[in-house]
Image (cartoon, helix red, strand yellow):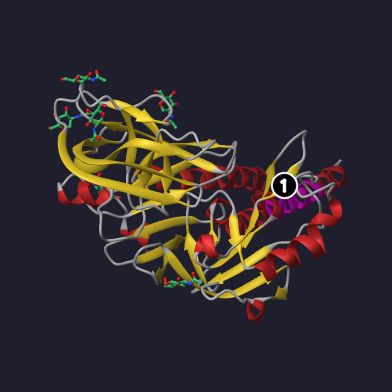
Amino acid sequence: MIITFILLIICIQAKLKLKTHSISNHQIKLKRHTTINSVPLDDQGNIIYYINVSFGTPSQIFSIVVDTGSVTTWISNQTCEGCIFPRFDPNISITLQQANEDHSINYNIGSLSGKFVQDYVGLPNGNLNVSMKFMLANVFTMPGIKFQGLLGLSSYNDRQNIFEYGYQQKQLETSLFGLDLNQNPEESFLFYNNFSDDYLDQVIWMPNVLNHQWSMKVYGFFVNEIDLTDKITLQNGTVALMDSGSSCLWLDEEIINYMLHRYILANCINNYACPCNSPLYPNLNIYLAGVKIEITSEHYMIPSNNGYCKPCLQKAGSTTHDYTILGDPAMQTIISIFDKENQQFGVYQGNKLHNLLIFQIIQISMITIQLIALCLFCYKYYQYK
Ligand SMILES: *[C@@H]1O[C@H](CO)[C@@H](O)[C@H](O)[C@H]1NC(C)=O
Ligand SMILES: *[C@@H]1O[C@H](CO)[C@@H](O)[C@H](O)[C@H]1NC(C)=O
Ligand SMILES: *[C@@H]1O[C@H](CO)[C@@H](O)[C@H](O)[C@H]1NC(C)=O
Ligand SMILES: *[C@@H]1O[C@H](CO)[C@@H](O)[C@H](O)[C@H]1NC(C)=O
Ligand SMILES: *[C@@H]1O[C@H](CO)[C@@H](O)[C@H](O)[C@H]1NC(C)=O
Ligand SMILES: *[C@@H]1O[C@H](CO)[C@@H](O)[C@H](O)[C@H]1NC(C)=O
Protein backbone atom coordinates (compact mmCIF):
# COMPACT_ATOMS: atom_id res chain seq x y z
CA MET A 1 0.00 0.00 0.00
CA ILE A 2 2.77 2.37 0.95
CA ILE A 3 4.54 1.61 -2.31
CA THR A 4 1.40 2.41 -4.26
CA PHE A 5 1.08 5.63 -2.31
CA ILE A 6 4.65 6.63 -3.08
CA LEU A 7 4.10 5.83 -6.72
CA LEU A 8 0.98 7.92 -6.70
CA ILE A 9 2.97 10.82 -5.26
CA ILE A 10 5.67 10.37 -7.89
CA CYS A 11 2.95 10.30 -10.49
CA ILE A 12 1.40 13.53 -9.22
CA GLN A 13 4.77 15.19 -8.81
CA ALA A 14 5.73 14.26 -12.34
CA LYS A 15 2.50 15.76 -13.56
CA LEU A 16 3.07 18.92 -11.51
CA LYS A 17 6.62 19.15 -12.80
CA LEU A 18 5.43 18.88 -16.34
CA LYS A 19 3.00 21.67 -15.65
CA THR A 20 5.53 23.95 -13.97
CA HIS A 21 7.90 23.29 -16.84
CA SER A 22 5.50 24.51 -19.41
CA ILE A 23 4.53 27.41 -17.17
CA SER A 24 8.11 28.34 -16.34
CA ASN A 25 9.01 28.37 -20.01
CA HIS A 26 6.24 30.85 -20.49
CA GLN A 27 7.40 32.83 -17.48
CA ILE A 28 10.91 33.15 -18.88
CA LYS A 29 9.40 34.75 -21.89
CA LEU A 30 7.21 37.04 -19.81
CA LYS A 31 10.04 37.87 -17.44
CA ARG A 32 12.29 39.11 -20.14
CA HIS A 33 9.55 41.51 -21.14
CA THR A 34 8.48 42.77 -17.73
CA THR A 35 11.75 44.01 -16.21
CA ILE A 36 12.61 45.47 -19.59
CA ASN A 37 10.39 48.01 -21.27
CA SER A 38 8.90 46.42 -24.30
CA VAL A 39 6.71 47.53 -27.16
CA PRO A 40 4.73 45.09 -29.27
CA LEU A 41 5.40 45.20 -32.99
CA ASP A 42 2.90 44.80 -35.78
CA ASP A 43 4.15 41.87 -37.88
CA GLN A 44 2.98 42.16 -41.48
CA GLY A 45 3.37 38.79 -43.16
CA ASN A 46 6.58 37.99 -41.21
CA ILE A 47 8.50 40.20 -43.64
CA ILE A 48 8.02 43.66 -42.18
CA TYR A 49 7.66 44.87 -38.61
CA TYR A 50 5.95 48.12 -37.64
CA ILE A 51 6.02 50.06 -34.37
CA ASN A 52 3.65 52.79 -33.16
CA VAL A 53 5.57 55.98 -32.49
CA SER A 54 4.17 59.37 -31.49
CA PHE A 55 5.50 62.62 -32.89
CA GLY A 56 4.91 66.19 -31.75
CA THR A 57 2.68 67.85 -29.13
CA PRO A 58 -0.16 66.90 -29.01
CA SER A 59 1.06 63.57 -30.28
CA GLN A 60 0.34 62.29 -33.77
CA ILE A 61 0.82 58.53 -33.91
CA PHE A 62 2.31 56.65 -36.85
CA SER A 63 2.93 53.00 -37.52
CA ILE A 64 6.48 53.00 -38.87
CA VAL A 65 8.99 50.37 -40.01
CA VAL A 66 11.55 49.12 -37.48
CA ASP A 67 14.78 49.25 -39.46
CA THR A 68 18.18 48.36 -38.02
CA GLY A 69 19.60 48.96 -41.50
CA SER A 70 18.79 52.70 -41.71
CA VAL A 71 20.16 55.61 -39.76
CA THR A 72 17.46 58.25 -40.33
CA THR A 73 14.08 58.29 -38.64
CA TRP A 74 11.47 59.86 -40.92
CA ILE A 75 7.73 60.36 -41.36
CA SER A 76 5.66 61.89 -44.15
CA ASN A 77 4.98 65.61 -44.15
CA GLN A 78 1.45 66.90 -44.67
CA THR A 79 1.88 67.90 -48.31
CA CYS A 80 4.38 65.20 -49.24
CA GLU A 81 4.34 64.16 -52.88
CA GLY A 82 3.87 60.41 -53.22
CA CYS A 83 3.51 59.65 -49.48
CA ILE A 84 0.62 57.63 -48.07
CA PHE A 85 -1.68 58.76 -45.25
CA PRO A 86 -1.70 59.44 -42.34
CA ARG A 87 0.90 62.19 -42.54
CA PHE A 88 2.37 64.49 -39.94
CA ASP A 89 0.76 67.91 -39.74
CA PRO A 90 3.48 70.32 -38.58
CA ASN A 91 0.91 73.05 -37.95
CA ILE A 92 -0.64 71.09 -35.11
CA SER A 93 2.54 70.53 -33.11
CA ILE A 94 3.37 73.38 -30.72
CA THR A 95 6.82 71.96 -29.93
CA LEU A 96 8.10 71.57 -33.50
CA GLN A 97 11.39 73.26 -34.35
CA GLN A 98 12.53 73.61 -37.94
CA ALA A 99 16.12 72.58 -38.52
CA ASN A 100 15.90 73.59 -42.19
CA GLU A 101 18.51 71.07 -43.23
CA ASP A 102 17.71 69.32 -46.51
CA HIS A 103 18.19 65.59 -46.58
CA SER A 104 17.61 62.76 -49.01
CA ILE A 105 17.84 59.00 -48.60
CA ASN A 106 18.43 56.38 -51.26
CA TYR A 107 17.20 52.85 -50.64
CA ASN A 108 17.73 50.14 -53.22
CA ILE A 109 14.03 50.36 -54.07
CA GLY A 110 13.75 54.14 -54.48
CA SER A 111 14.40 57.36 -52.64
CA LEU A 112 12.88 60.12 -50.58
CA SER A 113 13.81 63.65 -49.69
CA GLY A 114 12.75 66.21 -47.12
CA LYS A 115 13.99 68.32 -44.25
CA PHE A 116 15.13 67.70 -40.71
CA VAL A 117 13.05 69.02 -37.83
CA GLN A 118 13.28 68.63 -34.06
CA ASP A 119 10.28 67.60 -31.96
CA TYR A 120 9.15 65.22 -29.23
CA VAL A 121 9.09 61.55 -30.15
CA GLY A 122 7.64 58.87 -27.93
CA LEU A 123 6.79 55.19 -27.67
CA PRO A 124 3.28 54.02 -26.78
CA ASN A 125 3.96 52.76 -23.24
CA GLY A 126 4.52 56.37 -22.28
CA ASN A 127 7.86 56.27 -20.49
CA LEU A 128 9.84 57.66 -23.40
CA ASN A 129 9.25 61.14 -24.79
CA VAL A 130 12.45 62.62 -26.14
CA SER A 131 13.26 65.75 -28.04
CA MET A 132 14.72 64.34 -31.22
CA LYS A 133 15.85 65.24 -34.69
CA PHE A 134 14.02 63.42 -37.48
CA MET A 135 13.15 63.97 -41.12
CA LEU A 136 9.86 65.12 -42.63
CA ALA A 137 9.59 63.64 -46.13
CA ASN A 138 8.33 65.93 -48.87
CA VAL A 139 8.94 63.72 -51.89
CA PHE A 140 8.60 59.95 -51.86
CA THR A 141 9.52 57.88 -54.89
CA MET A 142 9.28 54.22 -54.01
CA PRO A 143 6.65 52.66 -56.25
CA GLY A 144 4.42 50.20 -54.47
CA ILE A 145 5.94 50.86 -51.05
CA LYS A 146 3.47 52.00 -48.43
CA PHE A 147 5.37 53.20 -45.39
CA GLN A 148 4.12 55.98 -43.12
CA GLY A 149 7.68 56.34 -41.96
CA LEU A 150 10.64 54.53 -40.55
CA LEU A 151 12.44 54.22 -37.20
CA GLY A 152 16.15 54.34 -38.00
CA LEU A 153 18.23 52.10 -35.72
CA SER A 154 21.48 51.45 -37.57
CA SER A 155 24.88 51.47 -35.89
CA TYR A 156 26.01 54.65 -37.65
CA ASN A 157 27.26 57.12 -35.06
CA ASP A 158 26.62 60.13 -37.28
CA ARG A 159 23.04 60.37 -36.06
CA GLN A 160 21.45 59.40 -32.79
CA ASN A 161 18.52 57.05 -32.46
CA ILE A 162 15.55 57.38 -30.11
CA PHE A 163 17.23 55.31 -27.37
CA GLU A 164 20.41 57.38 -27.41
CA TYR A 165 18.33 60.53 -27.09
CA GLY A 166 16.43 58.84 -24.25
CA TYR A 167 19.64 57.95 -22.44
CA GLN A 168 21.09 61.45 -22.85
CA GLN A 169 17.87 63.07 -21.71
CA LYS A 170 17.99 60.82 -18.62
CA GLN A 171 14.78 58.98 -19.41
CA LEU A 172 16.54 55.64 -19.90
CA GLU A 173 19.20 53.75 -17.96
CA THR A 174 20.98 52.64 -21.11
CA SER A 175 20.82 53.16 -24.85
CA LEU A 176 20.71 49.39 -25.50
CA PHE A 177 17.74 47.99 -27.35
CA GLY A 178 16.70 44.55 -28.50
CA LEU A 179 14.47 42.89 -31.05
CA ASP A 180 12.52 39.69 -30.58
CA LEU A 181 11.10 39.16 -34.06
CA ASN A 182 8.87 36.16 -34.47
CA GLN A 183 6.49 34.73 -36.99
CA ASN A 184 2.74 35.05 -36.63
CA PRO A 185 0.91 34.11 -34.45
CA GLU A 186 3.77 34.52 -31.95
CA GLU A 187 4.19 38.13 -30.90
CA SER A 188 7.16 40.31 -31.74
CA PHE A 189 8.71 42.96 -29.50
CA LEU A 190 11.18 45.76 -29.38
CA PHE A 191 12.61 46.19 -25.87
CA TYR A 192 14.90 48.69 -24.18
CA ASN A 193 15.98 50.48 -21.01
CA ASN A 194 16.24 48.18 -18.06
CA PHE A 195 18.42 45.21 -18.90
CA SER A 196 19.28 43.35 -15.70
CA ASP A 197 22.79 41.92 -15.21
CA ASP A 198 21.14 38.53 -15.19
CA TYR A 199 19.81 39.14 -18.64
CA LEU A 200 23.02 40.62 -20.01
CA ASP A 201 25.01 37.67 -18.62
CA GLN A 202 23.15 35.52 -21.11
CA VAL A 203 24.00 37.65 -24.11
CA ILE A 204 26.79 36.58 -26.45
CA TRP A 205 28.43 39.74 -27.80
CA MET A 206 30.15 40.15 -31.16
CA PRO A 207 32.04 43.19 -32.43
CA ASN A 208 30.46 45.33 -35.12
CA VAL A 209 32.83 45.30 -38.10
CA LEU A 210 31.57 48.29 -40.14
CA ASN A 211 30.76 51.60 -38.55
CA HIS A 212 27.70 52.42 -40.65
CA GLN A 213 25.77 49.15 -40.39
CA TRP A 214 25.19 46.39 -37.85
CA SER A 215 27.58 43.92 -39.41
CA MET A 216 29.03 40.62 -38.29
CA LYS A 217 31.97 38.61 -39.52
CA VAL A 218 30.75 35.27 -40.89
CA TYR A 219 32.99 32.26 -40.32
CA GLY A 220 30.86 29.62 -41.97
CA PHE A 221 28.01 29.13 -44.40
CA PHE A 222 26.51 25.64 -44.35
CA VAL A 223 23.61 24.41 -46.43
CA ASN A 224 22.43 21.41 -44.45
CA GLU A 225 25.81 19.99 -43.47
CA ILE A 226 27.61 21.08 -46.63
CA ASP A 227 30.28 23.72 -46.02
CA LEU A 228 30.10 26.39 -48.72
CA THR A 229 32.28 28.96 -46.98
CA ASP A 230 35.14 28.63 -49.47
CA LYS A 231 32.76 29.05 -52.39
CA ILE A 232 31.92 32.68 -51.52
CA THR A 233 33.05 34.93 -54.37
CA LEU A 234 31.60 38.27 -53.24
CA GLN A 235 34.17 40.76 -52.04
CA ASN A 236 32.22 41.48 -48.85
CA GLY A 237 30.35 38.18 -48.72
CA THR A 238 31.74 37.12 -45.34
CA VAL A 239 30.37 40.25 -43.69
CA ALA A 240 26.67 39.97 -42.81
CA LEU A 241 24.43 42.96 -42.15
CA MET A 242 21.85 42.42 -39.40
CA ASP A 243 18.93 44.20 -41.00
CA SER A 244 15.35 44.10 -39.70
CA GLY A 245 14.36 46.30 -42.67
CA SER A 246 15.17 43.55 -45.22
CA SER A 247 12.39 41.05 -45.77
CA CYS A 248 14.64 38.44 -47.36
CA LEU A 249 18.11 36.97 -47.10
CA TRP A 250 20.67 38.38 -49.54
CA LEU A 251 23.34 35.77 -50.15
CA ASP A 252 26.27 34.95 -52.39
CA GLU A 253 25.15 33.56 -55.75
CA GLU A 254 26.88 30.23 -55.04
CA ILE A 255 24.78 29.67 -51.94
CA ILE A 256 21.57 30.77 -53.64
CA ASN A 257 22.18 28.48 -56.60
CA TYR A 258 23.04 25.59 -54.36
CA MET A 259 19.89 26.03 -52.29
CA LEU A 260 17.56 26.73 -55.20
CA HIS A 261 18.77 24.31 -57.82
CA ARG A 262 19.79 21.43 -55.67
CA TYR A 263 16.91 21.42 -53.20
CA ILE A 264 14.12 23.92 -53.66
CA LEU A 265 13.07 24.56 -57.25
CA ALA A 266 12.58 20.89 -58.15
CA ASN A 267 9.46 21.03 -55.94
CA CYS A 268 8.06 24.17 -57.59
CA ILE A 269 5.97 25.12 -60.61
CA ASN A 270 8.16 28.20 -60.98
CA ASN A 271 10.23 30.49 -58.75
CA TYR A 272 7.09 31.94 -57.19
CA ALA A 273 4.93 28.87 -56.86
CA CYS A 274 6.45 26.37 -54.50
CA PRO A 275 4.80 24.25 -51.84
CA CYS A 276 5.19 26.07 -48.51
CA ASN A 277 6.60 23.02 -46.77
CA SER A 278 8.78 20.22 -47.96
CA PRO A 279 11.20 17.98 -46.11
CA LEU A 280 13.54 18.56 -49.04
CA TYR A 281 14.04 22.25 -48.31
CA PRO A 282 17.50 22.77 -46.80
CA ASN A 283 18.56 24.53 -43.61
CA LEU A 284 21.02 27.38 -43.88
CA ASN A 285 23.41 27.54 -40.95
CA ILE A 286 25.50 30.65 -40.52
CA TYR A 287 28.33 30.74 -38.01
CA LEU A 288 29.11 34.10 -36.46
CA ALA A 289 31.66 34.64 -33.71
CA GLY A 290 30.17 32.39 -31.04
CA VAL A 291 26.64 32.14 -32.39
CA LYS A 292 25.16 29.75 -34.90
CA ILE A 293 22.20 31.12 -36.79
CA GLU A 294 20.01 28.28 -37.95
CA ILE A 295 17.59 29.35 -40.67
CA THR A 296 14.99 26.84 -41.78
CA SER A 297 12.57 26.90 -44.72
CA GLU A 298 9.86 27.93 -42.25
CA HIS A 299 11.67 31.28 -42.15
CA TYR A 300 12.83 31.79 -45.73
CA MET A 301 9.75 30.48 -47.57
CA ILE A 302 7.14 33.24 -47.67
CA PRO A 303 3.56 33.18 -49.00
CA SER A 304 3.12 34.15 -52.66
CA ASN A 305 -0.19 33.37 -54.42
CA ASN A 306 -2.91 30.72 -54.30
CA GLY A 307 -1.54 29.00 -51.23
CA TYR A 308 1.93 28.71 -52.71
CA CYS A 309 5.14 30.07 -51.27
CA LYS A 310 8.33 31.50 -52.72
CA PRO A 311 11.87 31.43 -51.41
CA CYS A 312 12.78 34.83 -49.95
CA LEU A 313 16.39 34.41 -51.10
CA GLN A 314 18.08 37.16 -53.11
CA LYS A 315 21.41 37.39 -54.83
CA ALA A 316 23.70 39.80 -53.02
CA GLY A 317 25.70 42.03 -55.33
CA SER A 318 26.13 45.63 -56.30
CA THR A 319 22.83 46.76 -54.70
CA THR A 320 23.97 45.35 -51.37
CA HIS A 321 27.62 46.42 -51.85
CA ASP A 322 28.43 42.73 -51.97
CA TYR A 323 27.44 42.23 -48.34
CA THR A 324 25.47 39.26 -47.13
CA ILE A 325 22.25 40.59 -45.60
CA LEU A 326 20.62 38.69 -42.80
CA GLY A 327 17.09 40.10 -42.99
CA ASP A 328 13.95 39.00 -41.19
CA PRO A 329 14.26 35.24 -41.94
CA ALA A 330 17.50 35.28 -39.92
CA MET A 331 16.47 37.84 -37.30
CA GLN A 332 13.43 35.68 -36.46
CA THR A 333 15.68 32.87 -35.23
CA ILE A 334 17.46 34.98 -32.58
CA ILE A 335 16.79 37.58 -29.91
CA SER A 336 19.15 40.37 -30.90
CA ILE A 337 20.58 43.12 -28.67
CA PHE A 338 22.11 46.25 -30.15
CA ASP A 339 24.79 48.13 -28.25
CA LYS A 340 25.62 51.17 -30.31
CA GLU A 341 27.81 52.83 -27.70
CA ASN A 342 30.21 49.88 -27.67
CA GLN A 343 29.59 49.01 -31.32
CA GLN A 344 28.64 45.44 -30.55
CA PHE A 345 25.78 43.14 -31.42
CA GLY A 346 24.52 40.47 -29.06
CA VAL A 347 22.38 37.38 -29.18
CA TYR A 348 20.39 36.46 -26.08
CA GLN A 349 20.63 32.80 -25.01
CA GLY A 350 22.42 31.61 -28.11
CA ASN A 351 19.99 30.05 -30.48
CA LYS A 352 16.25 30.14 -29.87
CA LEU A 353 15.68 26.92 -31.81
CA HIS A 354 18.20 25.19 -29.63
CA ASN A 355 16.37 26.26 -26.47
CA LEU A 356 13.08 25.13 -27.86
CA LEU A 357 14.63 21.74 -28.57
CA ILE A 358 15.89 21.39 -24.99
CA PHE A 359 12.44 22.29 -23.73
CA GLN A 360 10.85 19.66 -25.92
CA ILE A 361 13.29 17.03 -24.67
CA ILE A 362 12.41 17.93 -21.06
CA GLN A 363 8.75 17.67 -21.91
CA ILE A 364 9.13 14.28 -23.56
CA SER A 365 11.20 12.91 -20.68
CA MET A 366 8.58 14.12 -18.18
CA ILE A 367 5.87 12.31 -20.14
CA THR A 368 8.04 9.17 -20.15
CA ILE A 369 8.47 9.38 -16.37
CA GLN A 370 4.73 9.76 -15.98
CA LEU A 371 4.04 6.75 -18.13
CA ILE A 372 6.55 4.61 -16.26
CA ALA A 373 5.07 5.71 -12.94
CA LEU A 374 1.58 4.96 -14.18
CA CYS A 375 2.55 1.48 -15.37
CA LEU A 376 4.24 0.71 -12.07
CA PHE A 377 1.23 2.03 -10.24
CA CYS A 378 -1.18 -0.14 -12.22
CA TYR A 379 1.07 -3.15 -11.87
CA LYS A 380 1.30 -2.74 -8.08
CA TYR A 381 -2.40 -1.99 -7.84
CA TYR A 382 -3.35 -5.25 -9.53
CA GLN A 383 -0.76 -7.11 -7.48
CA TYR A 384 -2.40 -5.92 -4.25
CA LYS A 385 -5.84 -6.70 -5.55
C1 LIG B 1 -0.89 50.89 -33.10
O1 LIG B 1 -1.94 51.80 -32.83
C2 LIG B 1 -3.16 51.43 -33.42
C3 LIG B 1 -4.15 52.56 -33.16
O2 LIG B 1 -4.17 52.92 -31.82
C4 LIG B 1 -3.64 50.11 -32.84
O3 LIG B 1 -4.84 49.71 -33.44
C5 LIG B 1 -2.58 49.07 -33.11
O4 LIG B 1 -2.93 47.84 -32.51
C6 LIG B 1 -1.23 49.51 -32.58
N1 LIG B 1 -0.24 48.57 -33.00
C7 LIG B 1 0.58 47.95 -32.16
C8 LIG B 1 1.55 47.01 -32.75
O5 LIG B 1 0.54 48.14 -30.96
C1 LIG C 1 -0.14 75.50 -41.96
O1 LIG C 1 -0.16 76.89 -41.63
C2 LIG C 1 0.24 77.71 -42.72
C3 LIG C 1 0.26 79.17 -42.24
O2 LIG C 1 0.41 79.24 -40.87
C4 LIG C 1 -0.74 77.57 -43.86
O3 LIG C 1 -0.31 78.36 -44.94
C5 LIG C 1 -0.79 76.12 -44.28
O4 LIG C 1 -1.77 75.95 -45.27
C6 LIG C 1 -1.12 75.24 -43.10
N1 LIG C 1 -0.98 73.86 -43.54
C7 LIG C 1 -1.90 72.94 -43.28
C8 LIG C 1 -1.59 71.58 -43.83
O5 LIG C 1 -2.90 73.14 -42.63
C1 LIG D 1 6.03 70.39 -44.44
O1 LIG D 1 4.98 70.78 -45.28
C2 LIG D 1 4.53 72.09 -45.07
C3 LIG D 1 3.33 72.32 -45.92
O2 LIG D 1 3.63 72.05 -47.25
C4 LIG D 1 5.67 73.04 -45.40
O3 LIG D 1 5.25 74.36 -45.16
C5 LIG D 1 6.86 72.74 -44.53
O4 LIG D 1 7.97 73.52 -44.88
C6 LIG D 1 7.23 71.27 -44.63
N1 LIG D 1 8.21 70.99 -43.58
C7 LIG D 1 9.42 70.52 -43.85
C8 LIG D 1 10.31 70.29 -42.67
O5 LIG D 1 9.81 70.27 -44.96
C1 LIG E 1 6.70 65.32 -24.19
O1 LIG E 1 7.37 66.25 -23.40
C2 LIG E 1 7.10 67.62 -23.76
C3 LIG E 1 7.99 68.52 -22.93
O2 LIG E 1 7.92 68.18 -21.60
C4 LIG E 1 5.64 67.91 -23.56
O3 LIG E 1 5.35 69.22 -24.00
C5 LIG E 1 4.80 66.91 -24.38
O4 LIG E 1 3.44 67.08 -24.10
C6 LIG E 1 5.20 65.48 -24.08
N1 LIG E 1 4.53 64.62 -25.02
C7 LIG E 1 3.87 63.53 -24.65
C8 LIG E 1 3.22 62.74 -25.74
O5 LIG E 1 3.80 63.16 -23.50
C1 LIG F 1 15.29 47.73 -13.29
O1 LIG F 1 15.22 46.36 -12.94
C2 LIG F 1 15.73 46.08 -11.64
C3 LIG F 1 15.63 44.59 -11.42
O2 LIG F 1 15.63 43.89 -12.60
C4 LIG F 1 14.95 46.84 -10.59
O3 LIG F 1 15.52 46.61 -9.34
C5 LIG F 1 14.96 48.31 -10.93
O4 LIG F 1 14.13 49.01 -10.03
C6 LIG F 1 14.45 48.55 -12.33
N1 LIG F 1 14.54 49.95 -12.64
C7 LIG F 1 13.59 50.60 -13.29
C8 LIG F 1 13.84 52.03 -13.57
O5 LIG F 1 12.58 50.05 -13.68
C1 LIG G 1 32.90 46.21 -49.94
O1 LIG G 1 32.92 47.01 -48.78
C2 LIG G 1 33.69 48.19 -48.90
C3 LIG G 1 33.80 48.82 -47.53
O2 LIG G 1 32.55 48.98 -46.93
C4 LIG G 1 33.03 49.08 -49.92
O3 LIG G 1 33.73 50.30 -50.05
C5 LIG G 1 32.99 48.36 -51.25
O4 LIG G 1 32.30 49.14 -52.20
C6 LIG G 1 32.32 47.01 -51.10
N1 LIG G 1 32.51 46.25 -52.32
C7 LIG G 1 31.60 46.18 -53.28
C8 LIG G 1 31.96 45.38 -54.47
O5 LIG G 1 30.53 46.74 -53.22
Task: Judge whether 148 appears above or below 208 on screen.
Answer: above
Q: Is residue 368 one of those drawn in magenta?
A: yes
Q: Does residue 302 appear left or right of residue 24 in this picture?
A: right
**In this orientation, which residue lies closer to the viewer: 31 or 272?**
272
SS under mark 1: strand
Residue 346: where, in percent of width, then height?
42, 63
Figure quadrant of the N terminus: top right
Q: Position of residue 224 (x, y in %)?
A: 73, 68
How packed mark 1 is, by other alpha carbons closer than 10 Å (few <14, some 14-19, many 20 or more), is many
Prevailing SS of the magenta stretch: helix
Q: Nearer the viewer, residue 276 or 306?
A: 306
- Compared across the picture, whether 161 is left or right of 310 comes to left
Residue beneath the point at 83% across and 49% down: 268
Q: Quadrant of residue 222?
A: bottom right
Magenta-colored span: 362-376
The x, y position of residue 315, in whole percent, is 63, 61
Q: Which residue is mark 1?
A: 310
Q: Viewed as shown, does residue 364 lie left or right of 72?
A: right
Residue 31 in sight in this render = no
Identity of the residue drawn at 27% across and 61% down: 157
